[in-house]
Amino acid sequence: ASRSKTTQPNKSSSSSRYSITLCHRGSTILPNASDFNRNSALKRLTEAGVTVMTDTSVTSVTAGDGQKAVHISDASSSASLPADLVVWTLGTQPSPGILNSILPRDLKNRIVTGPYCRVADTTNVFGIGDTCRASQTPLPANAQVAMQQASVAAWNLYATLQNQSSKDINDQTQLELLPFKYTDLGEMMTLGSEDATMTSLGGLVQLNGGVASLARRLVYAIRQPTNSQRALALLDGGVGKLLAAKQKK
């Protein structure tokens, strides 16, 4: 087992009023992110005064006499961190509707689908998103995958209904179902109200800071289904800046 690694915060930016420690049991934060985005996030955390501890497990959290304590351990030692506030992030699990269904699921309780986004052992049930497993190689659990799957699943559902109608009237015309193929368009990650990091085109495009934040907002605005939602996505950052400026006055 590896020893824990601690990334110390930038002392010039840390506040004397509080300290923040992030404990992660993995060897690195954001293991599924690109190297550029991961490094940008780690740099931003240290600049914000956050101590990052990896290869570190939280064994228990206790409270007494108004003081909480987080008990941690790594491969060679253990320690206790006093805390006023503890935020514990856990993994996700499928909704009860999926768990209570008779649809085929894998060991992680994801609905098993095939190349056409069609649920295994069915002819007219389709599934998309991170509640489904479309292939043996896991796809990223993000909106990008679900949005690409949506158009394919919509067409295949339409084609299935049309083909069934054609059979009912003895029409030999059959629409072909489309196989789903994921295209990785890149990765965007917010690091604050005016900070972000992003990679695209296989790493040819790498941005962070305010430029990445603006680019991220533009991409989200373009992807919105209605003009009002596009405007809201674009203006949201501007509204936040106006409110922050007003509070400083």
Image (cartoon, rainbow, N blue to C red):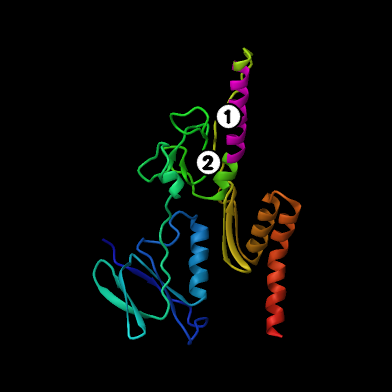
Q: Nearer the viewer, residue 122 or 225?
A: 122
Residue 68: quadrant of the picture? bottom left
Label 2 neighbourhood size at 10 Å, few (<14), some (14-19), many (20+)?
Answer: many
Above or below: residue 30 compared with residue 117: below
Mark 1, residue position: 178
Q: Nearer the N terminus, badge 2 or badge 1?
A: 2
Q: Position of residue 10 (x, y in %)?
A: 48, 78
124 drawn magenta: no
> For the magenta stretch, what is the residue range?
150-167
Q: Position of residue 249 (x, y in %)?
A: 71, 85
Label 1 neighbourhood size at 10 Å, few (<14), some (14-19), many (20+)?
Answer: some
Above or below: residue 229 compared with residue 170: below
Above or below: residue 165 compared with residue 34: above
Q: Quadrant of the N terminus?
A: bottom left
Residue type highlighted by circle 1: Leu
Above or below: residue 247 compared with residue 230: below
For image coordinates 41% across by 44% down, the residue present is 100
Mark 2, residue position: 128
163 drawn magenta: yes
Residue 167: quadrant of the picture? top right
Residue farthest left in this picture = 76
For image coordinates 52% across by 70% down, the residue present is 44
Q: Is residue 32 visible?
A: yes
Magenta part mainly helix, strand or loop? helix
Disc 2 is placed on an element classified as: loop
**In this rendering, position of residue 52 left or right of residue 115:** left
Task: Give the label on residue 220, or none.
Answer: none
In 3D space, how far apart are the residues under numbered discs 2 and 1 (Cα atoms)? 14 Å
Q: Position of residue 193 (x, y in %)?
A: 62, 69
Q: Is residue 175 visible?
A: no
